């Protein structure tokens, strides 16, 4: 990625961290269902690309994504069926939408990918 683009992305990353990650918990917001249920997953996908391109971003975002993944795994997945809800702090409630499930899968995939590159 070209340096000029990296600088733009890093500014966006900083603004995203300040606006999206809860300052106390580091959790990303519950975006609800429908198309918004996929936003968190898309965000995580592009953060992963940024962290792979610039390791200094991994020092900042790595712990935040790790925290989100841990909370999702421990609290946000319904044990009886393996489904996740839009808030990674609580199990899903019916009806469950594919977009929300994709976001949950995307953070777990990102964490596995980042772990395998370290």
Image (cartoon, helix red, strand yellow):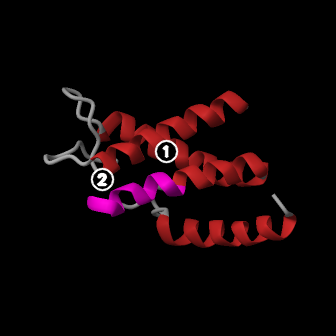
Determine the residue positioned at 34% across, 57% down.
37
Residue, x 72% and y 32% (percent of image)? 117
Q: Name the residue located 78 percent from the left edge and 64 percent from the top edge.
A: 6
Closer to the N terminus: mark 1 or mark 2? Answer: 1
Q: In the rendering, at what x and y percent does residue 102 appear? A: 39, 44
Residue 22, how many percent across, how many down?
A: 45, 63
**How far is mark 1 from mark 2, CA to CA?**
16 Å
Residue 28 in sight from this viewpoint:
no
Q: Nearer the viewer, residue 34 or 89?
A: 34
Task: Say which residue appears at 60% left-offset and 73% top-offset.
Answer: 15
Q: What quarter of the picture does the C terminus occupy?
A: top right
Residue 26: in sight, yes or no? yes
Q: Would you name the residue on which mark 2 appears?
A: 86
Q: Magenta stretch mostly in which secondary structure?
A: helix
Q: Please report the bounds of the magenta region as a residue range.
A: 33-43
Report how many numbered discs are placed on residues in the image: 2
Where 118 falls versus 37 (above or below)?
above
Residue 101 vertical position relative to residue 39 in the rendered view, above or below:
above
């Amino acid at each position: 990625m070209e340096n000029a683009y990296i600088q733009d992305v890093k500014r966006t990353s900083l603004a995203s961290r300040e606006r999206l990650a809860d300052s106390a918990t580091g959790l990303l917001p519950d975006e609800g269902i429908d198309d918004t249920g996929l936003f968190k997953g898309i965000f995580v996908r592009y953060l992963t690309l940024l962290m792979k391109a610039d390791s200094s971003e991994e020092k900042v975002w790595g712990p935040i994504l790790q925290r989100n993944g841990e909370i999702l795994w421990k609290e946000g997945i319904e044990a009886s069926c393996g489904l996740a809800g839009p808030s990674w702090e609580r199990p899903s409630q019916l009806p469950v939408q594919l977009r929300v499930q994709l976001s949950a899968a995307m953070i777990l995939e990102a964490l596995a990918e980042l772990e395998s590159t370290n």
